[in-house]
Image (cartoon, coloured by chain):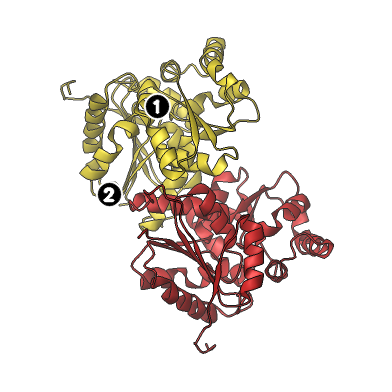
Chain colours: A yellow, B red
Amino acid sequence: MQQAIAILDSGVGGLTVVKEVMRQLPQEKIIYFGDTARTPYGPRSANEVRLFTKQIVDYLTQFQPKLLVIACNTATAAALDYIRSAVHIPVVGVIHPGARAAVKTTKISIVGVIGTEGTIKSEAYVHALKQLSPHIQVIQLACPSFVPLVEKGLFHTKETKLEIEKSLAPLHKEKMDCLILGCTHYPFLRNTISSVMGNEVSLISSADETAREISTVLYHHDKLATSNAIPIHQFFCSGDSKLFQQIAQEWLGEQIKVSPVVWQVPRII
Amino acid sequence: MQQAIAILDSGVGGLTVVKEVMRQLPQEKIIYFGDTARTPYGPRSANEVRLFTKQIVDYLTQFQPKLLVIACNTATAAALDYIRSAVHIPVVGVIHPGARAAVKTTKISIVGVIGTEGTIKSEAYVHALKQLSPHIQVIQLACPSFVPLVEKGLFHTKETKLEIEKSLAPLHKEKMDCLILGCTHYPFLRNTISSVMGNEVSLISSADETAREISTVLYHHDKLATSNAIPIHQFFCSGDSKLFQQIAQEWLGEQIKVSPVVWQVPRII
């Protein structure tokens, strides 16, 4: 049986990583878990996010994946190091790939980051960027309203556009040549974010960059898929599976089957 | 003492990787070896390139580097797997990073590759691209005249421009949306190559992409530099150290010291 890449997110955001893995690594089998019953993770405490992430990782390890992807910036900020020490397979988060791409892209060493409150408050991007390049300047902005809009499937409404314009307004006075979409939900809103920010700001999708990092890590572990057979992906979610399926099919452009998962765990820290 | 990244090339080409490592990972110390006495590697047999590469790796390992970079496409094509099995540190070649970037960049799944005769004949890019994405179409072209021009420091002459136009002419009838500069010497000629290929073809520098891959591999091995001290790099070359120093200082935009190395090894196989 082909070993899969396990990808988890607080909801549908990680599907942006799934879409890029399907495009950049079409031979790889994917097992996805969206914790739609407990989304959004952004306003939760780091401890709670860490607990939820560990529960999903425990669920996914039953499939014996070859690589684990924390496709949620909030969960990466709160739980990456913890999960890396808890499992015996490579773990890829979504923060370092975006940081690496930003360091490569910026010509003026000023980088913008938008994300959930949890991600911004953790300063995980600031740490990741400065670990690579200490003199880099980072401008952060939390956009707490974006994830709920995406989880409801409201990508192209007039209200969504107005909300994005309002949220990003503080960035207009800042000088930067690239902006990290520091939440895997944000590529759903990419076109509008791009038109608000203008052509001179390169948008960096942590989803696209993570797919590429997955490719690198699999290669260096000699774990890239060798079969030419078309992989059959599996999707799980903890909440409304019909809404999840609808959003996923629209985003991925293909039919998928979604298996609902009911958590039998207490909602405590 | 800070552990260095060891970078080798047939000559000055790997300096394009050095420049990007200095930019993307300014805290990392670099030890560079350019085999300028035996450049170009392109027309040599794979066996000979493998022997030369191993000799340089043996020289560089005396410095106990934490990572080894084969910053030469010809040497990567001929010797990457061999060197990976021969040393106990991570080894990064320049072919897979470029291939990964191309798979991410192309929207029409048609990718061009230019390189030395050795690189093109090895089909290393074709294999790397198709390993990731089997349906991708690859258009290859050998440009044997480019490396000697760069090694002589002739980046911006009228003759160089004419030679580039003539060499790339066969690509004009081909459809592609990205072109891999599949030789670390080629970024020296990037502006002219770009003007010949036109705006619709994205150029992918294996040098830029390799610097990013180095960042990824160091991170996943917990080997990123932690010191904020400015690193002092070391440069060695086997040929004319004055010409090497002149080209290196022009390219890197800073003063460097070059130590000449005289090989005491037979030129056989």
Mark 1 is on which residue type? Answer: Val
Query: Which residue shows up at 21% across the image and 32% down it?
Result: A55
Closer to the camera in the image, A237 or B235: B235
Q: Earlier in the sequence, mark 2 or mark 1?
A: 1
Residue B113 in sight in this render: no
- Circle on res. A89: 2
Looking at the image, which residue is at 60% across and 40% down?
A: A107
- Could you tell me which chain the residue with mark 1 belongs to? A
Q: Nearer the viewer, residue A96 or B4?
A: B4
Q: Secondary structure at mark 2?
A: loop
Q: Secondary structure at mark 1?
A: loop
Q: Residue B62 in the image: state x and y as whole percent.
A: 38, 73
Residue B241 occupies quadrant? bottom right
In the picture, measured across the screen, residue A10 lies left or right of residue B119, that is left
Q: Is residue A170 left or right of residue B244?
A: left
User: Residue B213: x, y in percent?
Assistant: 47, 52
Q: Chain of mark 2?
A: A
In the figure, is residue A196 to the left or right of A135?
right
Relative to B170, does residue A16 appear above or below in the rendering? above
| Marking on residue A12 | 1
Three-letter residue code for mark 2? Ile
| Mark 2 vs mark 1, CA separation in Å | 24 Å
Q: Nearer the viewer, residue B196 or A56?
A: B196
Dot 1: few (<14), some (14–19), or many (≥20) neighbours within 10 Å?
Answer: many
